[in-house]
Image (cartoon, rainbow, N blue to C red):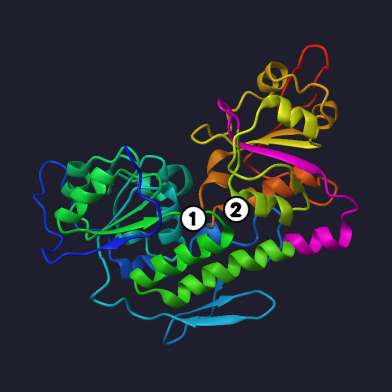
Amino acid sequence: MRAFDGVRLGFDRTGGGADGGRNSISAPRDPDRSSRRLAAGVDARGATGSGRAFRRAQPAQTPVWTLDWDVRLNLAWTMPSTHTPRRIACLQPSATVILDALGELGRVVACTRYCADVVPEVADGSRVIVSDSWTADTAQIVAARPDLVIAAVPYQEKAVSEILRAGVRFLGLAPKTLADIYIDIATIAGAVGAVDRGEAVIAAMEGHIEQIQDRVLTAATARPRVWCEEWGKPLIASQKWVAELVEAAGGDFVVTPGTQASAEDVRRLDPEVIIAAWCGAGDRVPLEKIIAERGWQETAAARSGRVFCIRDEFLNTPAPTLLQGLEALAFAIHPELFPRTKGIRQITGVLASTGGNSAR
């Protein structure tokens, strides 16, 4: 079924009501209360312990957050408008992560099971679990009585049409680059009346990426060739935003992002670092097996044991979660500069004749 491209926000005059049915749930927790924090997904301490993060200022008449970067940014909370959506259904983990980072998780009344991989709080039983953007079940979504549905490509045209006919607003995202992701964060922040917090989340992401870049520029002596894949059969290179993170972490992305390649193509490029982050696979990519089956035993990466699996959600979720992926990439590409972090697994040795032994 054909998927929509681009970003579309649909409205009609019929309102967001729907028959509650057996999947109806109670009203969400007060969004104002949950918005008194910013999610750990934008905690710039990350695995490196940089000490730069969102932190709460001293209690005052008006709660204030301080963003501790090179330039401090004080943000005064604003009350959400009565015109903002109060019940949101997230059909992709990235939307849930962004709302969590904005302190607006209380608005989420429905989400996918994959959202819990990146925002464990949504698995507390208070939210309806629905299918994702591509396998969307319209009746399931409408039964949750959302007043906004957020999805990302690929998503079903038929499902979107039915959601709009039911009178529910629909926001469809299609990011390709880091700049697109920042726009998506700003768009969602605007939709929930949290514009300043959205700008703060974006600034935190940009600042942390710049920190990694600065470390590489001042201390790295080489830029290793990096092959990073988001799928194994067929072999597909990771998306543009991952390529940008690889470059920020001091590597050279060896192919055009998001394109299909053959095992022979990659072998000829002789990457010095190989990274697998398969969509939906978590950290379970069989590294030794793919090196052996593809005949990559003689690549520079395999000979030096620099073959890694990075958790899918750290690289394939276009949201603040990418900062965790960046930390993992930095270790994989420049272990002499950055410490090992969570979410990364490495081959300890690959035999040229047999394709390898163990992973850790």
Q: Position of residue 232 (x, y in %)?
A: 58, 28
Q: Position of residue 15 (x, y in %)?
A: 13, 64
Left or right position of 129 against 346: left
**Residue behind mark 1:** 175
Q: Is residue 170 above or below residue 258?
A: below
Membership of 32 in magenta stretch: no
- Whether pointer 2 and pointer 1 mark residues with C-beta atoms closer than 8 Å, the reply is yes
Secondary structure beneath dot 1 equals: loop
Left or right position of 245 against 173: right
Left or right position of 91 against 217: left
Label disc, if present, on residue 241 of the rendered structure:
2
* C-alpha separation, residue under disc 2 versus residue under disc 1: 9 Å
**Furthest residue toward right:** 221
Q: Nearer the viewer, residue 193 or 303?
A: 303
Q: Nearer the viewer, residue 204 or 131?
A: 131
Mark 2 and mark 1 lie on one chain; the one further toward the N terminus is: 1
Determine the image quadrant of residue 23. Answer: top left
Q: Is residue 85 above or below residue 275?
A: below
Residue under the image location 59 percent in, 40 percent down: 259
Membership of 214 in magenta stretch: yes
Quadrant where the N terminus sits is top left
Q: Position of residue 246 (x, y in %)?
A: 70, 50
Residue under the image location 59 percent in, 68 percent down: 204
Residue under the image location 66 percent in, 54 percent down: 244
Q: Nearer the viewer, residue 103 or 280?
A: 280
Secondary structure beneath dot 2 equals: helix
**Mark 1 crowd level (few <14, some 14–19, many ≥20, 10 Å Cα):** many
Left or right position of 360 against 101: right
Callout 1 amino acid: Pro
The stretch in magenta equals: 212-235
**Furthest residue toward bottom:** 61
Callout 2 amino acid: Trp
